[in-house]
Amino acid sequence: MALIDAQKDYYAILGVIPTADDEAIKQAYRKLAREYHPDSGHGDVERFRQVQEAYEVLRDGALRLAYDRQRERRGLSEDAPVTFELLQSRAYLAPLDTPQVLYVLVDIRSKAESQKEASRQRLNIALVIDRSTSMSGARMQNVKVAAADLLDSLDPRDRLALVTFSDRAEVLAPSEWVENARAFKSAIASMVPGGGTEIYQGLLAGLEEVRRHASDDMVNHVILLTDGRTYGDELRALTEARRAAADGITISAFGIGEDWNDEFLDELAQGGGGVSRYISSPSDVRTVLKQQIQSLSNVLLQHMRLEINMAPYVQIRGAYRAAPYLEILNHQTGNGIALGNLSTGEPVVVVLEFVIEQAGTGDRRIVRLDLVAEQAVNSEEIRLRQDVNVTFTLDTVEEPPPAKLINHLARLSVFQLQEKAWKALQSGDVSQATRYLEYVATRLFDMGQRDLGQAAMLEVGRLSHGGDPTREGRKKLRYGTRGLIAAAN
């Protein structure tokens, strides 16, 4: 009995469509078998073996049905809800003993038909709000208005919990169906600023509310809003975020103003499988929360991860999210690279940087990439696979890199430079930090980003005159350059 390898596209091997009848499959096989048979004048043993394998499965009705079902379960059929495509900076490399760099762009997006057919996801969320003293005045007022707007944008079948925290946490409204709107509006109106900032307490309370009603047929998520720095509990908060992600609960963290710790909130959101955002003006809270609810409601795939298997002579040197925002990804774990969720109409693009040392010639599969995720609609796992193939040849091949990849790399370089600037400052190298920011400003002006370019030059001026950079300038540059990447999509 023939063995089924669902990762192989037998229909593509025979050059037929998945709905081809038995006669079409037989004719395609006979044509290819004559062409690639080892005894023919231009035979190809490997291609002949592939054609034979495909035919053995597709000619048998029971095997073909089993094959189609396996492909469908793994998301490899035409019915897969997403596309998973690669772009390489080069397909030909010289066989050298010295290291060579190869960039691979991974593009994951929902199919057009999936967007049309997708239904709104039910939400199980907790809104965790910092109510410390620094939230007094316009900030708290805008947060109250934004929370009321969020309530109006939810579906009666959604669950919501409202949690506030200062130096302790308080569950103002336990997780309940949103149809009970009066209780939530009363809780929102009762929020009064006061006290310090201990994020862990609020985060833990929010996660407990979501965890009590966590369900595979809902998007389970915590939204954290803060304007301050937490002290002494960062490690506990990060540990709790990773534990929540393992339980299928994601976390997003939004910082208001300039006083919060952007590195901590970035790490908290990344560990929790969510996003972090900079809200420069309190009046922008409403817009950010609405965008987040819309994104959560349109989730198509959850808990995506990219598994990377490399040839012995290949190493991965960097991994970066390039859309819908830019982020440096952790590629050093044994569980693959966590990518969070995919929402309809909002592609996820990743850039991988590989270093290759290969002295031999010939065609090689150097990397195998597996995208693993859960479908939000039914929690079934899908697995999509793509190979990175390179031809090592002594011939010179003119091969311009794809424009789309170059576009992303250009924006990525700006983000990396400003990150290097802040690290140089932390180590006390002011002159190097100044040079990096000057490069950033020049590139931003070249890209037509005058506002960000001027922000970079203002920080250069402060450093040049012996001053310190501003928190506002740092956040504007970090999150502004992160947003540039979406324009390359």
Image: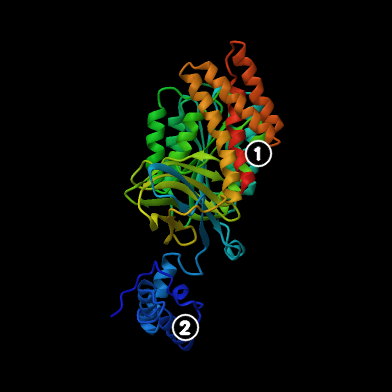
Compared to residue 46, the image places residue 426 above or below, namely above
Compared to residue 205, the image places residue 304 above or below, namely below
Question: Mark 1 is on which residue type?
Answer: Arg
Q: Which image quarter: residue 147?
A: top right
Question: Of the residues tagged 2 and 1, which is closer to the observer?
Answer: 2
Q: Tell which residue pokes out farthest to the bottom in this image.
A: 23
Residue to which mark 2 is pinned: 28
The residue at the point 64 percent across, 47 percent down is: 152
Q: Tell which residue pokes out farthest to the left in this image.
A: 1
The residue at the point 34 percent across, 51 percent down is: 311
Q: Position of residue 38 (x, y in %)?
A: 35, 78
The residue at the point 39 percent across, 84 percent down is: 59
Which element type, helix, strand or loop, lies under badge 2? Answer: helix
State the colouring used for the structure image. Answer: rainbow
**Label 1 CA crowd tier, 10 Å (few <14, some 14–19, many 20+):** some
**3D distance between C-alphas at marks 2 and 1:** 59 Å
Which of 138/389 is in front?
A: 389
Question: Mark 2 is on which residue type?
Answer: Ala
Residue to which mark 1 is pinned: 286
**How many labels sit on residues?**
2
Q: Position of residue 199 (x, y in %)?
A: 46, 29
Q: Where is residue 53 in the image (x, y as percent from the top left)?
A: 35, 76
Which of 484/314 is in front?
A: 314
Compared to residue 269, the image places residue 67 above or below, namely below
Q: Position of residue 243 (x, y in %)?
A: 37, 41
Q: Which of marks 2 and 1 is nearer the N terminus?
A: 2
Q: In the shown orientation, is residue 83 left or right of residue 208?
A: right
